[in-house]
């Protein structure tokens, strides 16, 4: 639950309480985007790291660049994490990295400006890695299938995807083909 300032304009003073829907996510694949809800209130990152198909409800499909509206996809009942290149919260979904995790990671991890190629996407942002992790080894098999990229910008076919969240997305390591990093100062 997030609390934000309320515009007191014509309504007086007060606050607005916004509830984020756990498990509402958008998955970008080579074939298009899937907007769906996870079953059972599981967090998206936790479900994906199990490396097994995840059950979903209310799936919709459309092109990655949103050149056409999303359409119901009643036949989509599960999604394979290995088919997903990028996962991000839907507009009303919970962040893929909690505020507490992000704060802890920013204190104890090394920050890198990064550009990743995860076919067919190009992702720029900030990567937080343990001091022992080599950012150039991210294309190799690792214990985590998905890595969070903070302050992301996602492009597909040289067009920037407009609905990328400002906080973080998850990028599938198995889709990464090229990594360019610079240590932040």
Image (cartoon, rainbow, N blue to C red):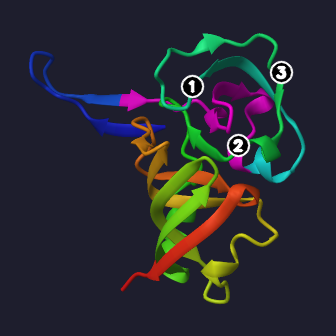
Residue 25 lies in magenta, yes or no?
Answer: yes
**Residue at (67, 38) in percent of width and height:** 29
Q: Secondary structure at mark 2?
A: loop
| Front tag of 3 and 2 | 3
Considering only vertical position in the picture, is 67 above or below 173? above
Percent across and percent down for residue 126 are 46, 67
Quarter of the rendering occupied by the C terminus: bottom left
User: Residue pushed farthest left?
Assistant: 9
Q: Which residue carries the number 3 mark?
A: 77
In the figure, residue 152 lies in which quadrant? bottom left
Numbered disc in front, either 2 or 1: 1
Which of labels 1 and 3 is toward the front?
A: 1
Picture mark count: 3
Sequence-wise, which precedes: disc 3 or disc 2?
Answer: 2
- Is 23 contained in the magenta span? yes
Would residue 74 appear left or right of 29 to someone viewing this image? right
Give the mark nearer the N terminus: 2 vs 1.
2
Residue at coordinates 56% horizontally, 63% vertically from top-left?
116
Q: Which residue is mark 1?
A: 63
Q: Residues within 10 Å of mark 2 (few under 14, many from 20)?
A: some
Pick whichever of labels 1 and 3 is earlier in the sequence.
1
Q: Give the SS element for disc 3.
A: loop
Query: Seen in the image, is 16 located left or right of residue 137?
Result: left
Q: Which residues are magenta?
A: 17-45
Q: Is residue 71 above or below residue 143?
A: above
Give coordinates of residue 108: x percent, y percent. Answer: 55, 82
Residue beneath disc 2: 43
């Amino acid at each position: 639950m997030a609390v934000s300032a309320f515009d007191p304009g014509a309504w007086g003073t007060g606050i607005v309480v916004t509830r984020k829907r756990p498990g509402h996510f958008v998955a970008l694949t080579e074939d298009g985007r899937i907007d769906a809800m996870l079953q059972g209130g599981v967090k998206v990152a936790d479900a994906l790291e199990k490396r097994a198909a995840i059950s979903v409800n209310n799936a919709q499909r459309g092109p990655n660049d949103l050149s056409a509206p999303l359409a119901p996809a009643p036949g989509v009942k599960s999604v394979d994490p290995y088919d997903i290149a990028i996962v991000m919260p839907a507009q009303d979904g919970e962040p893929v990295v909690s505020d507490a995790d992000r704060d802890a990671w920013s204190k104890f991890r090394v920050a890198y400006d990064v550009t990743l190629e995860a076919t067919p996407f190009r992702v720029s942002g900030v990567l937080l890695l343990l001091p022992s992790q080599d950012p150039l080894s991210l294309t190799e098999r690792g214990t985590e299938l998905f890595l969070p990229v903070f302050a992301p910008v996602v492009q597909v076919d040289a067009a920037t995807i407009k609905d990328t969240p400002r906080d973080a997305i998850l990028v599938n390591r198995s889709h990464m083909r090229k990594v360019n990093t610079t240590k932040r100062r």
